[in-house]
Image (tube, rainbow, N blue to C red):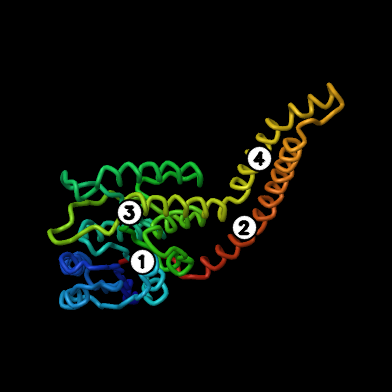
Amino acid sequence: MSELQTPPRIAAIVPCYNEEAAVAKVVTDLLEAVPNISVYVYDNNSTDRTAEVAASAGAIVRREERKGKGNVVRRAFADIDADIYLLIDGDDTYDAFAAPEMIRELVDNHLDHVLGCRKEEHEGEGAYRPGHAQGNKLFNRLVGFLFGEPVTDMLSGYRIFSRRFVKSFPAQSREFEIETELTIHSMALRVPQKEVLIGFRDRPAGSESKLRTYHDGFRILGLIGRLLAHERPFAFYGGLGLVAFVVSLILGVPVIVEFFQTGLVERFPTAILASSLAVIAALCVVVGTVLSGVLKARREALRLSYLRLSPPPEHL
C-alpha cells in the first residue's frame, strides 16, 4: 500500500503599507483560490487599519518596522518555513486566482521560479501608467542584454518560488528594487524558471500607489549597475577600462606624434593625463580579472548551498 502523500506547505507573502482598502480582498481571494494556503500579511508601518483588516480576513499578520518592500521580503524569507512561496502585492492589482496555475507550473515542471507577467484586464490609467510601462520595457531589454537571458516583466511583484530559491536568496535590497534583485539572482544562479501571463487591473477606490516613477527608476538603474559590477565584474570593469584606454589614445596619440616630429613634449599635462588613463585602463582589466575569479568561487559556494536544500515538491 502506497504511503499517503503530504500536500506541500504553501505560504503567501503580502507586503503592505497603508492598504486598508485592498488587503482584505487579496487575502480572501488567495484563501479561496489556493486550499490550505497560509497568508502572511507584513504590515510595513502602516498608519491606517491594514493590520486589523487583514487579520479579520483570515491572514497571519506580522510587522516589519524597517520601511521598504525589500526589507519586508528579506524578513519574510527568513522567518517563514514552507515548500512553496507566493509573493504578491497587497493592493489588489494582481489576479490572485492565477495562483493555482502558477503553482502547478512550478510543481509539474520542477521549477524554482515562476514570474507573473502583467497583462491588463482592461484599460485604465491606474493599472499600468505609460511611464511605468515604458520604463519596465527599457529595464527588461537592458537586463536581458547585460545578463544574457530575456525577461518580459522583471518588475512584476507576483511570483512563485521553491524553498531552495527562497533560502538561497541573499535579499540585499531595501525598497522596490527587490524585484530587480530577484530577477537577476534567478539569472545568475540559472535556476529553472518560467513566465506566466496574469491579469493586472486598477487599484480599488481609496488605494494609492506608493511608486515614484523617476525616483524609483533611478534606484533600479543604480541597482542594475551595482549588480552588473557584482555579477559580471570583467564586463563591468573591462568596459570602464576600454573607455579609459580609448580616451587615453585620443589624448596621447597627438602628443606622441608631436614628440617624434619635434623631439619635445609641449603639452605635458595632456601627456600625464593620457598616461594616467592608460594605467587606469590596465588596472581595470586586472581588477575585473581578479573579481571574476572571486565570482566563480562565490557562485560555486552559492550553488552548493542551493543544492543542499530540498527541491520543488513532486505533487500538490
Q: Is residue 6 above or below residue 131?
A: below
Residue 207 horizontal side relative to residue 176, left or right: left
- In whole angstroms, how far apart are the C-alphas of marks 2 and 1? 28 Å
Cβ atoms at labels 2 and 4 below 8 Å apart: no
The answer to whether residue 282 is seen in the rendering is yes
Q: Residues within 10 Å of mark 3 (few under 14, many from 20)?
A: some
The residue labelled by disc 1 is: 68
- Please name the residue shown 35% across and 54% down the image: 115
Q: Secondary structure at mark 1?
A: loop
Residue type beneath disc 1: Gly
- In whole angstroms, how far apart are the C-alphas of marks 1 and 3? 16 Å
The residue labelled by disc 4 is: 244
The residue labelled by disc 3 is: 156
- Tag in front: 1 or 3: 1
- Please name the residue shown 59% across and 47% down the image: 236
- Mark toward the start of the polypeptide (2 vs 4): 4
Q: Secondary structure at mark 4?
A: helix
- Quarter of the figure with the C terminus: bottom left
Q: Is residue 93 above or below residue 18?
A: above
Cβ atoms at labels 1 and 3 below 8 Å apart: no
Q: Residues within 10 Å of mark 2 (few under 14, many from 20)?
A: some
Question: Which of 168 and 255 lies nearest the eye of the viewer?
Answer: 255
